[in-house]
Image (cartoon, rainbow, N blue to C red):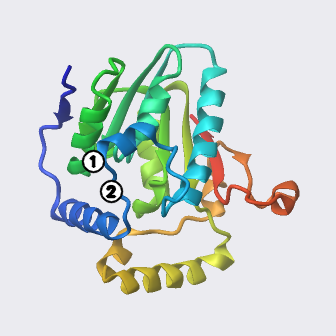
Amino acid sequence: MQMIIQIDDKHFSSSSNEFEQLYFDLRIQEKRMYTDDEVMWLPDVNSDHIHRNEWKIRKTSCQRLTRYLANKKKPLKILEVGCGNGWLSYHLSQIPNSNVVGLDVNFFELQQASRVFAATPNLRFVYSDLNEVQNDKFDIIVFAASIQYFRSFSDIIQSALNRLNTAGEVHIIDSHFYYQTEVEDARQRSREYFDSKGFDKMDGFYFHHTLKNLDELNAEILYNPNSLINRILKKRNPFHWVCIKK
């Protein structure tokens, strides 16, 4: 069976196209492009994999999120924004009575996702951005390691909330949230990293959101890496897990 990637009837802006190419090229340099067989097994990777520690963290995040959603024990229509090669969308599709859409502007990885997970009937992929998804409503919208690529946190979250059904939830995992006093140092580290890789233009597409952004939202932190117990635990997950309710 072949899965079809839905392409919205629109033209991406020049900035979106620039981001897509920069992101794709940087991922190649960082050795974050995987074979179809590797994607099928994610988040599990070989013990000598260059990003093994990162995938251990993402596996923990995936397990927490899927367990939380499965415990709702009701049909869920789920959207993952920035799904990449589709590995997390696939795991979300394994939740009983779920129907999952993976959304991204990275066409190469969406093509790979459609090949690897072609036999999953309740999973489809869309080449578009959230602002162009006008008609569908969802129970759950997930941003996994993707919220940092949106300039305005409030704008993208409002866009997500507008696409939720009643009592819907937005979940943000695998992305840093900073205290206001940490932002400038974090920006400088990002600039230095992109410069070291020869991708200085990526600095214009990577943003550092703060915990203060959550103040005016119906937000709950389901996992806080800065809590006392988590600070004393070794190999803790460094990312907040944020749930924003409609």
Residue 33 bears which disc, if any? 2
In the displayed structure, would residue 228 be above or below residue 159? below
Asked whether 63 or 80 is in front, the reply is: 63
Locate the N terminus and report the quarter of the image it occupies. top left
Q: CA distance from mark 2 to mark 1?
A: 8 Å
Asked whether 246 or 53 is in front, the reply is: 53
Q: Mark 2 falls on what kind of element?
A: loop
Mark 2 in CB contact with mark 1 (< 8 angstroms): yes
Q: Amino acid at mark 2?
A: Met
Q: Is residue 162 visible?
A: no
Q: Position of residue 216 (x, y in %)?
A: 63, 52
Identify which residue is drawn at 41% across, 64% down.
151
Q: Is residue 53 visible?
A: yes
Q: Is residue 111 left or right of residue 176?
A: left
Q: Mark 1 falls on what kind of element?
A: helix
In the displayed structure, would residue 120 be above or below residue 61? above
Q: Position of residue 200 (x, y in %)?
A: 33, 82
Q: How many marks?
A: 2
Identify which residue is drawn at 63% across, 47% down.
242
Q: Amino acid at mark 1?
A: Glu
Residue receiving disc 1: 109
Q: Position of residue 17 (x, y in %)?
A: 18, 61
Q: Are there few (<14), some (14-19), or many (20+) residues within 10 Å of tag 2?
A: some
In the displayed structure, would residue 53 be above or below residue 156? below
Q: Position of residue 174 (x, y in %)?
A: 56, 53
Of callouts 2 and 1, the N-terminal one = 2
Q: Is residue 19 left or right of residue 141?
A: left
Asked whether 122 or 11 is in front, the reply is: 122
